[in-house]
Amino acid sequence: ITPIGQDAPHNHSSYVCAGSLEQVSVTGHFSVPNGGSNDRQSFIEGTVRFNTDLNTLEFFNGNEWRQFTYNQGQSGRGVFANGRVGPTPYNTIDMITIPSLGNAVDFGDSTQNAISPAGVGNGTRGIFAGGYAPAPGTIIEYVTMASQGNAISFGSITPAGRRFMSPAASSTRGVFFGGRLNPTAAQTAEIKYIEMGTLGDTEDFGNLSGGADMRGAAASSPTRGVYTSGSQSVPAGDNRNEYVTIAAKSNSIEFGDLTVSRQYQSASSNSVRMVIGGGAPLAAPAGDTTMDYVTIASLGNATDFGNLTVGRYSFSSVATQTRAVWVGGSAGAPNDNYNVLDYVEISTLGDAMDFGDLTEGRYGTAAASDSHGGLGGF
């Protein structure tokens, strides 16, 4: 509060914790209350504040916090790379426009024929790492999301190639959980990361706190990367969830469980909710239609969401702030080359609906989006 006649330069501090304005007249600038995500206290529908953790304005819609973010070229594009039909690895890259329905179209080609790489993306790049064909690959490559074309070399996975990693990303950093180092070795607990705006090799991030694992799924909010177990850990059938803070390198922290223990599932998210779809039971390869979800900020056990149109595993998914799409997959021989695309509206519960078809049915693909939940925005 500035008494009349005193000069008090504005320092961007906020002195009102909660309140409302009937009218305001501003000739220079006006600052709303600010603070981190943990500083949210009493609020009502329509509350607006600046989140210093996310560096963006946010508002409370009566149910959850949503972020305003400048649209940095996010078009709702999803791209899908590699995969296989039977024993044959592919270098195909397809794309879709997530807000609309329709079949995938050709985007370009990967630098390698690969099975089960991991994909991350932001508003500029889609990045694909690892895989095998048949040896585990060290290759990391990228495409420019806004334009079609072939992939370009990004760097390498160090110190060894791997497959069955689970990817999550913010707008700047891609994180890869677990995986398998080679065809005969056990899975790894390592978490690797890359800076997506530069070129280079992976760096060490930390380790899965629940131990070595592979064939799980991951997704993200702007601050957290969440990993759901592939149930390859000890004890077998563990269905744990774990999370990391993407901006800080550390080991993951365990929280809650999935509704169904499974492996080879796929997950996507907006900035609030992560939806995990499909997978296969541990005993034998067979497709599962299960979809469950977790609220990323609050953590806790997963809750039932609905069912996929076709039970399948070993596939990928992409998302915008409103919609998630699952791509291809297998249900075990002879149904190992589904071309199915199905989708859900993330904010509501219910079964998936038909979206369209891939250019060619396959499984073991990687996926990236320019509009997923790790990028924030609304």
Image (cartoon, rainbow, N blue to C red):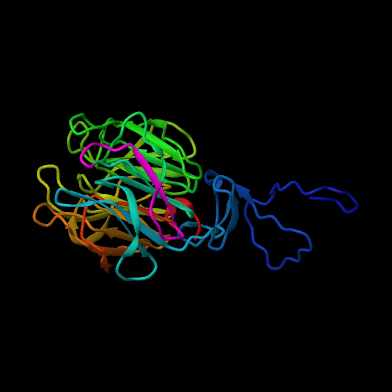
Residue at image coords 69%, 49%: 14
Looking at the picture, how far across and down is residue 23, in whole percent? 71, 68
Q: Position of residue 180 (x, y in %)?
A: 25, 35
The residue sitting at 50% across, 62% down in the picture is 61
Which stretch appears magenta?
133-152
Determine which quarter of the picture holds residue 31. bottom right
What x and y, as percent, mark residue 194? 44, 39
Q: Is residue 299 visible?
A: no
Magenta span: chief secondary structure: loop
Q: In this orientation, does residue 24 appear? A: yes
Quarter residue 349 falls in:
bottom left
Q: Is residue 111 left or right of residue 339?
A: right
Nearest the eye: 127 or 17: 127
Residue 79, by quadrant, is bottom left
Q: Residue at x 38, y 54 (%)?
A: 150
Report the front residue among 273 and 128: 128
**Image height check: is 277 above or below 300?**
below
User: Is residue 251 highlighted in magenta?
Assistant: no
